[in-house]
Image: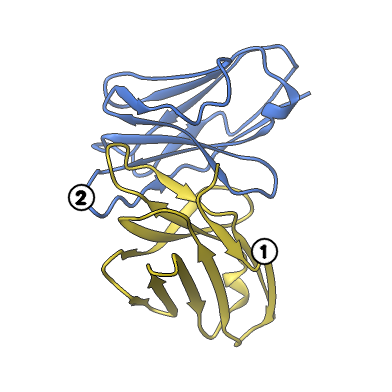
Amino acid sequence: SQQGEEDPQALSIQEGENATMNCSYKTSINNLQWYRQNSGRGLVHLILIRSNEREKHSGRLRVTLDTSKKSSSLLITASRAADTASYFCATDEGGATNKLIFGTGTLLAVQP
Amino acid sequence: GAGVSQSPSNKVTEKGKDVELRCDPISGHTALYWYRQSLGQGLEFLIYFQGNSAPDKSGLPSDRFSAERTGGSVSTLTIQRTQQEDSAVYLCASSLVMAGSNTIYFGEGSWLTVV
C-alpha cells in the first residue's frame, strides 16, 4: 500500500504561473523526496528534504516539510511548458530496507 | 554503465506465459529496488536488494513473482503464469545507501502487456 497521498491529482496552469502540489503521509520519516516522471517512464529525483528541515530550495523549486502535520508541499515558480509531467513525493521511513514509498502523484499540465 | 538499464523496454506476452525482466544498476550501487506502476497510478514497491540478499520482499503481489540478484549487480524479476492484471510498467532503481539520504536512480522501465 502507498504511504503518501497527493493533492491535487491533476493541475492545469498557464506558463509563468506558480504550481503548488501537496503530499501527506502516515508514519514517521527519515526524509521526504520529490520525483518527476515524464510520459510514464523513469522517475527523476528533484529534491530531498530531511525530517529536521522545514524548507529547501533548488532553482525554481521550493519544498516545505511539516512533520507535525505529516505533510509536504512542492512549489514550482514561474512554470514552463517543459515542467509538464507527473510529480511524486516519496518517503523514507529509515530502518533496514531504505525503501522509498511513493505517493499517488500529481499530473501537472503547463499550458503555453 | 552511466545509468540504470532495463530490458526489454517493451514486452507483449500471452496470458499464462512466464516473463523475465532484467535490470542492470548503476555500477557500485549496492541497493536495488523493483517497483510496479499501473497505468495512471503511483509506484507500488515490490522488492529491495542489498547486495545479493533481499531483506524486504514484502511488496511481491503473489508467489508467481520472484526476483534474484547475482554478483551484487544485475537483477532479474520473473513473473510466472502471467495474468492480465500483471500488465504494468516495471521500474528498477538503484542507490548508494547513505544514512539519511538514499536518493534512488530509476531506469526507463519495462512495459509489460499481457494479452
Chain letter of the residue beneath label 2 in the structure image: B
Expressed as whole percent of the image width and height from the top left, the position of residue B13 reads 71, 20
**Label number found at residue A49:** none
Image-based side of A94 in relation to A12, left or right: left
Say what amino acid the circle numbered 1 marks: Gln
Residue found 60% across the figure and 13% down from its top: B80
Expressed as whole percent of the image width and height from the top left, the position of residue B102 reads 30, 50
Image-based side of B57 in relation to A98, left or right: right
Say what amino acid the circle numbered 2 marks: Ala
Question: Disc 2 to disc 1, how far (Cα)?
Answer: 31 Å
Residue found 72% across the figure and 28% down from its top: B85
Q: Quadrant of residue B93?
A: top left
Q: Mark 1 — residue?
A: A9
Q: Which chain is blue?
A: B
Q: Which chain is yellow?
A: A
Q: How is the image coloured?
A: by chain
Answer yes or no: are tags 2 and 1 on the same subunit.
Answer: no
Outermost residue on the left side: it is B99
Chain letter of the residue beneath label 1 in the structure image: A
Quarter of the image with the N terminus of chain B in it = top left
Q: Mark 2 — residue?
A: B99
